[in-house]
Image (cartoon, rainbow, N blue to C red):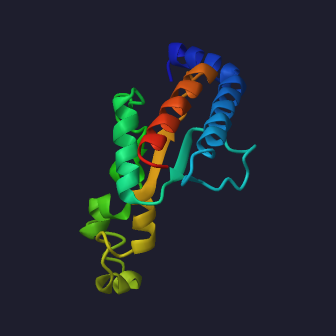
Amino acid sequence: MSEVSAAIAYEQVQKLDQITATMRACNHQLYDGLAQINGVTLRRHPDPEGDSGPFVIFTLPSADIAKELVKRTRNEGVRPRLQGASNIRVADWGLHLHWEVTSLVNKQSVHSSGRPWTDPLNTFHTEISYEKGILPVMENLAERSILMTVPPILTEELVNQVLDIYHRCAKDIGL
């Protein structure tokens, strides 16, 4: 690491507690506000105080309602940044979904050894499909769930704006 990179990293580490506290506060504010919408089921937090708060996930009664709510809230201004990883249905996000991992679905190794597919202890894989449809309960949940990231620059005022938009749009679609 160069001296300049180290200096930047050092300064960021000094702010880490403040950054995490801000993200946690906004995360809790979003969860509290979203909980007031009929039909919303919040992600279970086994340790809310230990969660650094980088994202919010909640589930709706159906995939169609989730699609419509994302569409309407985006039209009202709750838009993702460059990479689109916010205010998105989990099923559309792509990350961590078995059917989106081509090396898993196609059983192709990312390593020159061919492992795990060439491992003699892993021959049972020939009987397993990793295509969409293998885990219907999880897939249904991903279709009905919305993910919002909580960046460290988010403020209480912006969270209130996001919640106002969500409440208004949810009401408009009958939630």
Percent x, y of residue 113? 30, 67
Q: What residue is drawn where x is 36% and y is 78%?
A: 119
Percent x, y of residue 13? 66, 24
Q: What residue is drawn where x is 55% and y is 22%?
A: 158
Q: Is residue 134 left or right of residue 13?
A: left
Q: What residue is drawn where x is 64% and y is 56%?
A: 44
Q: Is residue 8 above or below residue 93?
A: above
Q: Is residue 95 visible?
A: no
In the picture, residue 30 is in which quadrant? top right
In the picture, residue 49 is in which quadrant? top right
Of the pair 89 and 97, the residue shown nearer to us: 89
In the picture, residue 129 is in which quadrant? bottom left
Q: Is residue 40 above or below residue 115?
A: above
The total number of labels drawn is 0
Q: Is residue 119 visible?
A: yes
Of the pair 131 and 73, the residue shown nearer to us: 73
Of the pair 146 and 172, the residue shown nearer to us: 172
Q: What residue is drawn where x is 53% and y is 30%?
A: 164
Percent x, y of residue 55? 55, 41
